[in-house]
Amino acid sequence: MGDDARLDTLFDADRQKIDRFFHKLSDDECREWLWDWQVWGRKAQQAPDGDWRIWLVMAGRGFGKTRLGAEWVRQQAEDDPDARIALVAASLHEARSVMVEGESGLLSVGSPDKRPVYESSVRRLVWANGAQAFLYSAGEPESLRGPQHSHAWCDEVAKWDAGALRGTSRAISAWDNLLMGLRLGDDPRMLATTTPRPVPLVTRMLDEGEAGGVVLTRGSTFDNAPNLPARFIAAMEQTFGDTLLGRQELYGELIGDLVGALWSRALIESAREAIAPPCTRVVVAVDPPASAHGDACGIVVCGLGDDRIARVLADCSVEQASPERWARAVADAAHAWSADRVVAEANQGGAMVEAVLRAAEASLPLRLVHASRGKTARAEPVAALYEAGRVRHAGMFPRLEDELCGLMPGGDYQGPGRSPDRADACVWGLTELMLGRAGEPRIWFD
């Protein structure tokens, strides 16, 4: 179909022009029009022109990356009966549940009578014309050593190393093995879709640029706003809108790490889990503000599981709060999480801090702690716990994580705001759980 068939043109057309357009179409074309991605996809979701080797789509969540990838694969399969396509995700489960069977996956796009058959026993999709696609896990790089392909779709490449030990080359190995096998047909090409994260594989593609045959498409969550629930858009703006994590996850920006910072975003991502197991001990850590009109009151909930791994469970911090308000927030957090202890920094008027908290809840299991070292000095042994895999984040805590990534060795803070109040509370909580009152490391034997 020509450019006059594009949806944006039809939106602007009057009824007579629309009638003339459909009158020119055959019955088969009318049926196909409903599934024509050239009509329904946004311009940024269409494959770029030119002689490229790798199309990197780096965009925010909800942009439509999965639909884009599925439609691109469908087009290659329908155009080329000899196509042999690799579908690579962080795990085989994600390859199947997202790329194949998801709401925007390959079994849901295109004309129903042209959709492929999924043979789960051999992890293969087969189209009626003979084209085939095969599922792979980036967690098994050796599975990509040997097979040959004409095309590949790699989904969420920035998380291929999630959960692996820092410094691993698993993602790079999987990518390189795939590239070496991309040698079928006259014009082998690869699509990589991802939410941006400053991991080695993504930065490598960006460094290669057009000189290396890489073309880049950027986009944000809000580009796809007409197809997303208004409440979702509002919630994302409220929760993440003014954070670095929001710029990354929603606006599709690649947020680089500060050189030498105690925490990196890759380190935090490797420590993230969706659901925390039951905790045997829970503490609420508090970094009280100096005044009601200054910094935030950091309130962070941390727990320790039977596996002797600590979890950051919640960030209940409040900003520009009166003593009564932040004390009530602490008491509420302690009740909500059945905390065994409340740990509060007492350098800023210890007696006042205790009095305010006792006024909010007399029965709080309170312990005051006094800082003899600076914030970043206290943070260093806690950062080491992350490096050792002894801490997890049970969810996403954008403002807390922004502050952690701004803590530098030697006492410098280069994160958002004047002071890392959330990060300091987190450090107090994890120190209480993992390092003991004296702040000395413990050795755990599994």
Image: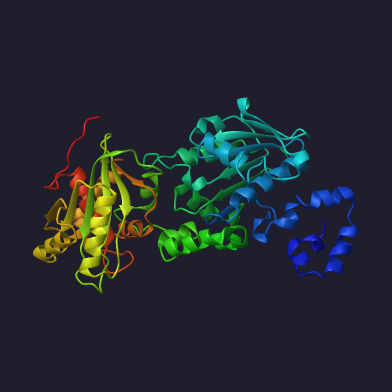
Asked where in the image residue 330 lies, by quadrant, the reply is bottom left
Asked where in the image residue 76 lies, by quadrant, the reply is top right
Q: Residue at left 17%, top 42%? A: 441
Viewer-proximal residue, 181 or 372? 372
352 on left or right of 108: left
What residue occupies the far left of the structure in this picture?
351
Q: Is residue 165 above or below residue 293?
A: above
271 on left or right of 359: right
Please state, as top left, top right, bottom left or bottom right, where the N terminus lies in the image: bottom right
Q: Residue at left 76%, top 70%? A: 12
Q: Is residue 387 above or below residue 210?
A: above
Q: Is residue 103 above or below residue 64?
A: above
Residue 123: horizontal and vertical position, in percent? 61, 30
- Counting every numbered tag in the picture gives 0
The coloring applied to the image is rainbow
Q: Residue at left 75%, top 66%? A: 11
Please state, as top left, top right, bottom left or bottom right, where the C terminus lies in the image: top left
Viewer-proximal residue, 74 or 429? 429
What residue occupies the far bottom of the structure in this picture?
293
Can residue 107 be seen here? The reply is yes
Q: Residue at left 52%, top 60%? A: 231
163 on left or right of 359: right
Residue 236: horizontal and vertical position, in percent? 47, 60
Residue 8: horizontal and vertical position, in percent? 73, 65
Can residue 408 be seen here? The reply is no
